[in-house]
Amino acid sequence: MDWALPDDGQLTLVPDFVPAERRSALFEALRAEVPFAAKQIKIFGRSVDQPRLTAWIGDASAVYTYSGVRHEPEPWPPELAALRERVSAAAETGFNSVLCNLYRDGHDSMGMHSDSERELGQNPVIASVSLGAVRRFQLRHRKRKGVGLDVDLPDGSLLIMRGELQHHYRHGVPKQPQIQAPRINLTFRRIS
């Protein structure tokens, strides 16, 4: 599925990017290999716990600063390195890093934001793989009220954001307390 959004926002969803027979094993391998941890970010000058577990993985040069925190990359675990090659080919972008998110259940979330940090370049391509519980992805235009999209991201899906999407839109994963199962989300990026 492809969406061409106002102001050159481009979004692509590939529902079965990870084959069904591979999803559960990949989820468990990533849960075991990736050093997920509770991290703090700065919001309005205060340090607060992120409402999910995260890990920053990447090439040695892929240092990334967001929410007032500098992230030094952990090395690529084997399963994640192999997945990076497939995601890079699908998105036609050479990714050198990935933000790994573990949503323990529907109480964990990601607030509305744009991936607009300087290290990501002018019009970054962000490719996001979802494994586990289906969660809602929300996209909202910064200035045009009512312009946006809600998409439920299925297990094994790949979502690619490109064009000027990060300039004009914010996105997030809201709380969904009724969801009991965990979800791993991997957002591949290129840090320059």
Image (tube, grey):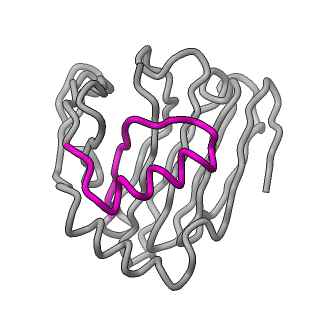
Residue 27 percent location from the top left of the image: 36, 72
From this view, report whether residue 164 is shown above or below residue 48. Answer: above
Residue 23 percent location from the top left of the image: 46, 77
In which quadrant of the rendered view does residue 45 lie? Answer: top left
Residue 108 percent location from the top left of the image: 34, 59
From this view, report whether residue 123 is shown above or below residue 76. Answer: above
Specify the quadrant that holds the N terminus. Answer: bottom right
Decide which of 169, 174 is in the foreground and name it.
169
Decide which of 145, 179 is in the foreground and name it.
179
Question: Residue drawn 46% across and 68% down?
Answer: 131
- Let me know if residue 19 is in the magenta part: no
Question: Residue drawn 44% across and 73% down?
Answer: 132
Question: Residue drawn 47% across and 22% down?
Answer: 120
Decide which of 151, 91 is in the foreground and name it.
91
Span colored in magenta: 75-103
Report the residue that reaches farthest toward the bottom.
Answer: 21
Specify the quadrant that holds the C terminus. Answer: top left
Residue 152 percent location from the top left of the image: 63, 64
From this view, report whether residue 176 is shown above or below residue 94. Answer: below
- Let me know if residue 81 is in the magenta part: yes
Q: Is residue 95 left or right of residue 48?
A: right
Q: How many marks?
A: 0
From this view, report whether residue 186 is shown above or below residue 135. Answer: above
